[in-house]
Image: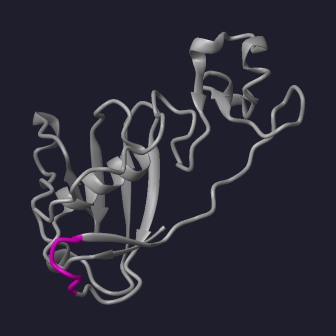
């Protein structure tokens, strides 16, 4: 995914955006790691050296920099992010804009070969459990273990069911 981000946007704003569009399932903690510093979405007495996410992107990122984002520390999703160009201003009222996004991967039903629309949140760890609507009732783990196939790195993980993508992304 390629984003255009308002120069005043904070890590909190970017975290909120990533959660809404790609990863949020159950309110798990998240961390950005930039230049060896962790910026956490939570306060923990064991991680006192970590920073909060109230930093503006323009103050800590520059063109060409790579940094990491982790969401959920039980079934962790890790994203590697890169600043492609200089941080520049975007039109007011639109702090984060999606400029381009990947085409959703296609999965096939392991029973009949049709397009999979659901995945088992238990079997996915064995790279299995992809089923279509028709074959879902036959899945051995039960239909209550199935999650929708969505365009996200968290497909089939924890309780992730897809983006709400209706939030207003505040830059602060």
Q: Is residue 152 left or right of residue 149?
A: left
Look at the image and tell me in which quarter the C terminus lies. Answer: bottom left
Q: How many marks?
A: 0
Of 85 and 31, which appears nearest the observer?
85
Q: Determine the residue positioned at 21% across, 77% down.
A: 6
Quadrant in the rendering for residue 140:
top right
Q: Is residue 169 magenta?
A: no
Q: Is residue 28 left or right of residue 154?
A: left
Relative vertical location of residue 58 with respect to residue 48 in this rendering, above or below: below
Q: Where residue 25 sits in the image (x, y, percent)?
A: 38, 34
Quadrant for residue 117, please give it: top right
Q: Quadrant of residue 86?
A: bottom left
For the residue pair 81 and 167, the one nearer the viewer reads as 167
Q: Residue at x 19, y 46 (%)?
A: 41
Residue 105 in the image: state x and y as whole percent. Answer: 68, 53
Please name whichever residue, 78 or 111, is drawn nearer the observer in this view of the structure.
Answer: 111
Image location (x, y in percent) of residue 166: 31, 50
Main SS, magenta region, reads loop
> Measured from the top left, where is residue 146 in percent x and y?
61, 22
- Please give the name of the residue rendered at 45% of the width and 27% of the height, measured from the top-left corner: 159
Question: What segment is highlighted magenta in the picture?
Answer: 89-95
């Amino acid at each position: 995914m390629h984003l255009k981000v308002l120069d005043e946007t904070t890590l909190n704003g970017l975290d909120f955006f990533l959660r809404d569009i790609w990863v949020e399932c159950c309110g798990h903690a998240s961390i950005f790691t930039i230049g060896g510093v962790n910026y956490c979405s939570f306060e923990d007495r064991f991680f006192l050296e970590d920073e909060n996410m109230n930093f503006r992107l323009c103050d800590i990122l520059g063109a060409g920099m790579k940094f990491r984002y982790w969401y959920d520390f039980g079934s962790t999703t890790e994203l590697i992010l890169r600043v492609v160009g200089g941080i520049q201003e975007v039109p007011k009222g639109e702090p984060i804009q999606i400029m381009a996004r990947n085409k959703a991967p296609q999965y096939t039903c392991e029973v009949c070969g049709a397009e999979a629309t659901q995945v088992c949140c238990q079997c996915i760890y064995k790279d299995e459990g992809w089923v279509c609507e028709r074959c879902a009732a036959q899945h051995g783990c039960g239909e209550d273990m199935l999650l929708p196939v969505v365009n996200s790195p968290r497909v089939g993980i924890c309780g992730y069911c897809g983006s709400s993508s209706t939030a207003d992304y505040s830059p602060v």
